[in-house]
Amino acid sequence: MTAERKIVEISEAMEEIPGGNRGLLYEENLLWEKERSDEPGVDLPEPEGIKLRTGQPARGDIGLPQVSEPQVMRHFVRLSTWNYSIDHGFFPLGSCTMKHNPRLNEKIARFPGFAHVHPLQPESTAQGALRVMFELQEILGELTGLPGVCLAPAAGAHGELAGIMTIRRAHDAKGQSHRNIMLVPDSAHGTNPATAAMCGYELKVIPTKETGRMTVAAFKEALGDGKNVAGMMVTNPNTCGLFESDILEISKLLHEAGGYFYGDGANFNALVGKARPGALGVDVMHINLHKTFSTPHGGGGPGSGPICVTKDLAPYLPVPVVEKRGETFRLAYEDERKETMGRLKGFTGQFGMHVRALSYILSHGADGLKQVAEDAVLSANYILSQLKGDYHAPFGGPCMHECLLTDKFQKDSGVTTIDIAKTLCENGIHPMTVYFPLVVAGAMLIEPTETESKDSIDRFITVMKKIAADVKAGDTDKFHNFPENTPRQRLDEVTAAREPKLRWRA
């Protein structure tokens, strides 16, 4: 069966299915609205003759709703059914890589020796855990071509902070403290300029709007004489889903001026097993373990953002790092690593994520990791090839692991990116990332990842094509009302922004 015929059949089948999900879809109000008694769900005797050890006065009524145990349980279980996750369906957030988390990784992370390890127990009793961390350091160094690795950063932005602080420490140690400028493309993740500013750097923007990429000419203009440039922060592939084709020449110019190349590793899953960032001139790089190596993403954590650096920068890494002495694994701290930029957090990072990432890497092997990158790029280019006639593609040629479209073709009919996103909700599909990168008006950044089947991608394509076809036919009014069959309908975003209701009152 041809892909075109399959899309037609999926489309025909969808015509028979009402939008959204009805079934056992519970309405759910607040716990305070369920309150039916002055008595709590659990009765505890009033403590007598016990002095508060906090030194604080005794608390009065703290306003908790008085509900029974079944009410509490059902309330939170029902709310949990509203949570959309990668286990529910397609989650095509561009620049966020929401992909399947293999259950093998979860099983291994729950081994008692891993799940119950404590950072303060003697190193002699945690050799297995330290070996996991050491092997992960070694593999990440090999994959990136950057042999110095620290696993401590607790998230991607934390890794950025660690990377830029490492660069700052290196310049200070070499008597180059006058270097106070960081170059950042205008399409960068917002954390890049924020991190540079937090580390005391002035920002100089490299424009990319014309091609979606940096050009050598634009870089040279931003670099100037380079005397005060500390480095540049570049994501490659970038946030437009494109490979920075001039990166070798640009990194050479930066190094000749004495600056360091910080590589934002957010999109490393497009390169893993295929290319080493160190070979592209990167000096410092953070890796989002959740993006490339499938550790859980979203819901507030836990995150993990290890950094990898060149051999020359390795002495300035944060501590601790795991070292191997003979057959023993140990943590090295400030007393041994005198040039370190210091500690980032209390202990060694999110160890459970280290276990999951190493499990993912070992279960895939070198050939499997290479296929990860290939399949991620293939999936994105398949979507681009199917939709670029229905939606505006701002930049020509193939993309990397995510494709960028805009609402330019639909906007004149009154249907915008937000309407398209809400219509996807109506059809049970989580929207792509919208209005980012900011350098492209009406942006829709789509990342299918390597873990999605062709069937799920085809369903997404079918819905997107149906939206474009309805707009072209003039059937546009409905798009301003979607979603209609979700637990909550469309928010009046202007009123919500101007008059936010931040607190529930009876």
Image (cartoon, helix red, strand yellow):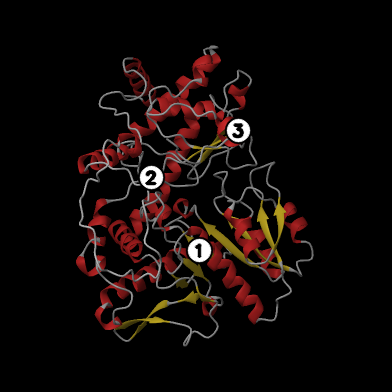
User: Toward the viewer: 141 or 479?
Assistant: 479
- Alpha carbon of mark 1 to alpha carbon of mark 2: how far? 24 Å
Residue sitting at the far right: 225
In the picture, measured across the screen, residue 33 lies left or right of residue 179, that is: left
Say what amino acid the circle numbered 1 marks.
Answer: Gly
Q: Position of residue 155 (x, y in %)?
A: 46, 60
User: Toward the viewer: 194 or 440?
Assistant: 194
Q: Which residue is mark 1?
A: 159
Please say if 47 is above or below 469: below
Q: Position of residue 53 (x, y in %)?
A: 34, 71
Q: Which residue is mark 3?
A: 442
Say which quadrant the N terminus sits in.
Answer: top left
Q: Which tag, 3 or 2, sits closer to the chain's start?
A: 3
Q: Which tag, 1 or 3, sits closer to the chain's start?
A: 1
In the picture, measured across the screen, residue 252 lies left or right of residue 133, that is: right
The residue drawn where x is 31% and y is 56% is: 364
User: Toward the viewer: 53 or 439?
Assistant: 53
Say what amino acid the circle numbered 3 marks.
Answer: Gly
In this view, the mark in front (1 or 2): 1
Q: Could you say which quadrant of the image residue 362 lies in? A: bottom left
Say which quadrant the C terminus sits in.
Answer: top left
In this view, the mark in front (3 or 2): 3
Please say if 332 is above or below 351: below
Say what amino acid the circle numbered 2 marks.
Answer: Glu
Please say if 275 is above or below 407: below
Q: Which tag, 1 or 2, sits closer to the chain's start?
A: 1
Under tag 2, what secondary structure?
loop
- Alpha carbon of mark 3 to alpha carbon of mark 2: how far? 26 Å
Q: Which residue is mark 2?
A: 450
